[in-house]
Amino acid sequence: MENIGKTFPGVKALDDVGIELYGGEVLGLVGENGAGKSTLMNVLNGIVQPDEGKIYVDGEEKEFSSLIEAQNSGIAYIQQELNLIDELSVQENLFLGKEPLTPFRTIKFRELFKKTQEVLKSLGLNISPREKAGNLSLAKKQMVEIAKALLFDAKIIVMDEPTSSLTDEEINVLYKLICRMREEGKGIIYISHRMEEIFSFTDRISVLRNGACVGSKSTKEIDHDGLVRMMAGRDVEERFFKEETQTGPVLLELDSIHGQGKVEDVSIQLRKGEILGIGGLMGSGRTELLETIFGIFPPREGRLTLDGKPFKPTSPYQAMDQGIAYIPEDRESKGLFLDFSILANVSLTRMEKDKSLYNEANHRISIDRVSEKLGIVAPGLDSRVENLSGGNRQKVILARWIHAGMKVLLVNEPTRGIDVGTKTEIYKLLYDLNKQGVGIIVVSSELTELLMISDRIVTLYEGQLSGEFSRKEANKEVVLQAMTGKKEMVTGTG
Amino acid sequence: MEHINRKALDVFRQNREIISLYFVVLAIVILGMVFFPAFRGRQNLINLMNQIVPIGFVALGQTYVILTTGIDLSVGSVMSLTTVLAATRMNGGDFQSVIITLLLVFAAAIVVGGFNGLMIARLRLEPLIVTLATGSIVGGIALFLLPHPGGYVPYPFTQLWSQTVFNFVPMGFLYLLIIIALSYFLLRNTRFGRWVYATGGNERKARNTGLKVDLVKVKVYITCSLFASFSGLALASRMHSGDPLSGNPFTLFSVAAVLVGGTTFSGGRGGILNTVAGIFILSLLRIFLNIAGVSPYFQNLLTGLIIIAAVLYSSYSKGSLKGGVS
Amino acid sequence: MLLERIRNDRNLKVMVSLLLMIILILGIAGMITPRLLQPGHLIELARQSVPLGITALGQSAVILSGGIDLSVGSIVTMTNILAADMIRGRDNRTIPVVLFLLALGILIGGTSGFLIAKTGIPPMVMTFAMSSIVRGGDLLYSGGAPGGRASPMLRFFGAGRVGPVPVSVIIFIILAILVLFWFKKVRTGRSTYFLGNNFRAAKYAGVPVERRIVFIYAFSATMAVLSGLIFSGYIGVGSFEVGGEAFMLNSVASAVIGGNTFLGIGNIAGAIPGAFIITLINSILRSLGIAVTGQHIMQGVIIIVMVVLYTGQIGFSRKKLKKAGG
């Protein structure tokens, strides 16, 4: 068999790291955020150059100064953010940078089309090569990326969080593909925060911590708790269920709301001191529903009641003013001002709410307290948010709303891309807020998370409510069924 | 058969935007013919073609740049400088002087475009600021060379532009058609063209895929400057003289033509055919104002309104009309 | 302690380097023509930079919010022509006319801002079109021949002195303090920086973004009106020479030299030294007899040099972090 070995080196983020990958195996690469997984993969793929250390492919020493060089040596990197350009067609994307050219330097479109069709067919994908990449679903885009890896006959395939936005069904398709590639003798490095996947997909697991490799174990030899311990270097209680709390009066009521896009006829009640989970596939209208309540897309029809008073969200400003808070799923583009300080990022909303003059000293004192409570790790309130890790960035947004004050908190994907240790912290913060009387609505594509933190779960399918489950009724199967629209199976009604 | 039908449908679906754009152009032409009998005349069509030539080249060049999410605000000054060079360097119009002047003009354009491109690509400076600054510098040089409108563009050279083929189509318009065809082909079928779209679509991803984005940008700004110098030559031959300020209005007019055609600042969308439609729409409306005898003062005002309306319409028809600046 | 603060605080660093630059330019100019450094001349320089400084404050706000205002030049011209024509030298008309013009400015800027916020039309196109409309309106109103003159009261504001200090400089100082306070402490002003850095995030953080965009463009237009009034008071008559495109470009240059970027990074205060530097250089070039040409070229060069320096600061660290993170 092919025997692929590599030894890795250390940048400052990486200290003397060595991992090996063999042909025909799936290697899980795990570690908390900032442990150096991405940096390591960037080194392997020539995006970052190492200060020391060497990379061997097929026993041959290699030096990559760009992604392209790595690709030419048979390494494919499927990054978290897919590398497809929406404006180009699928076939152009597949061959971008490697277009077959005629002697006149024009592109041989016929060859492009034929080859693309072949590879898509071999993957069992029903996508037109001429379709614009922007029109594809996330899952299909992911498959196209894999097609690209196959097309150029990659021996090593690196996948960074490939499932973070896929539904369970799509994950299954991905799983089959991975198995097939493994059988073909390819080496696969699989990075994920999702423990279930790591355990079911991989043959061997390497753990990174603080830029160092703390061990590689065969997947069979290690259990969930052991792995989490290795990653954190301490005992972490990952399963951190919410305590039963006494729910109070109805805080927020949606009465047959018709909103942006598909959202149709949704009626929900949220009680004080309750965490309501919303389950749904991508495109089920879950984000649109939250954004309707937050006033991004004012509702077309229906009534809202907040604290017993009628409430009509016409803009985020107005929703914020009434005590609705929203943490979007896309922190960087919808949440943060990366070039500005923590202080500026947090104080903004309070400033808008207070409607009085901005007094930096007052803000600073109060934000200092919030930041300490949330455990934001940063040199100071004046450090730029850009330098913070994903978990800390999420905490900055949370701090913004705590600083401003709120009655209802809407959270979209509370822990996407956040490591296990910080996840628990975020859960704890949500529970604390909940205890203080803040009603919380959570949307999450991680079912485990949803089941863990919600007092009650409602599901959305094609923009309509398809089920409601109390904590006792809820389990993976029934919620999933309701999410995928099998309405007749739904029995629970709260 | 079915396969071909499906393909045809595909083509239609993918080009619906362009097709509807040309329906607008057609509608404007028909309305013009109905309401302005004068417009039906042969001379008016020739006028239309002559009017389109200077704005045409520069708007095509601007398209390349805007497709990569950039903008070039130095084109007007490049045009001015070109008219100045043409009016002062061609002497009596002997073959040698004309060639040397042309080489000088193109060299100047390449230097300006190359400088813009390098500053924007290598130093990652804001295109708007860089080209505004180079525009200022180039404009200053034009004023230095020829402080007041004047000079003389010799007859043989203007002939190259204004002579009509078949007693109908001006040569300048033919050149423009050639450049349109070339640009269309270049952007659609060559590697460079697709890389332009890739760069505009998502620069970081294009870089990650290993495209030489910096090179694409430099080439794009050089192309834009070169096309602007073509426009300058057309302008000079129409005026028979040079004018250090004559290019200025074209800067934003070229941007407007591109946007009216539906190419957006967000990059990677639109293209040559869009811009051609944009040029036609804006030029036709201007001609109608002329024919209708609207006072030049009022034309200023109407041009502003037309640009707003046209850009709003083109973003509205694409369904991308939504609140917010990006 | 102070040095460390300067090193860490970008805006402070920009301010200090701008002050050093002013001193440097004055020093060099003083060596060539010592007359320049006489107190009287320095005060005259300060007076000259007032109209540009006021406009640049507005332009900086727009740029910091991620947009650009190409209409300020025309608004200055409009103010001058309307003020002279409507006041016709009478004191009792001055205040109503000033109020009317301010309202008109708010209306013009507010309309641009409203359309930009509501429809997503690119600010550059919107304000360019608005500029065209305003200029057309001017020409129609005046028939191309502006008349009238400023009243003694307006003349006092534009050209009067209290002791050795020009009234316009005093007005500017008061205005600048108000504006700086507004953009530091009051939410309508302070949020401008956030809009520029991440418009969407500002919206999601509960900033009423659309209203703010309207406010910012209305503010910029109001500043342009004030600047036009000061001009009118100084010149005393209506003229198409006042304001215009060159003045607009100067305001953009002042804002950019003042360290302001489209990403909300910078400080509106930078406009003040920025405007002073532009005025200073123009004045030096004029005394050297290379007024127009030199101004254009120098302005372009300074913009590029300053922007390269500024991006060297933030741009580099940003790029580095992008590579390390992820």
Image: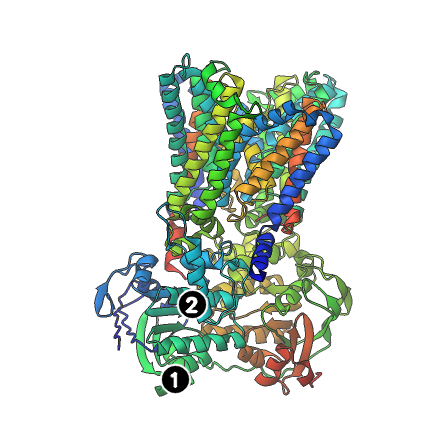
Q: Image quarter for residue B221?
A: top left
For this view, does C46 lie left or right of residue A217? right
Which one is closest to the eye, mark 2 or mark 1? 2
Q: Are marks 2 and 1 in contact (CB under 8 Å)?
A: no
For this view, does A472 lie left or right of residue A5? right
For this view, does C92 lie left or right of residue C277? right
Q: Amino acid at mark 2?
A: Ile
Q: Nearer the viewer, residue C52 or C295?
A: C295
The local crowd at label 1, few if under 14, some if 14 to 19, many if 20 or more residues have their Cα within 10 Å, is: few
The answer for which chain carries disc 1 is A
Q: Nearer the viewer, residue A458 or A175?
A: A175
Residue C294 in sight from this viewpoint: no
The answer for which chain carries disc 2 is A
Residue farthest to the top? Answer: B92
Reading the image, the residue beneath label 2 is A146
For this view, does A110 lie left or right of residue C134? left
- Is disc 2 in the same subunit as disc 1? yes
Q: Residue at x 61, y 81 (%)?
A: A481
Q: CA distance from mark 2 to mark 1?
A: 32 Å
Residue A226, which numbered label? 1
Q: Residue at x 47, y 22 (%)?
A: B160
Q: Quadrant of the C terminus of chain C?
A: bottom left
Residue C15 in sight from this viewpoint: yes
C69 in relation to B48, above or below: below
Q: Image quarter for residue C144?
A: top right
Q: Amino acid at mark 1?
A: Gly
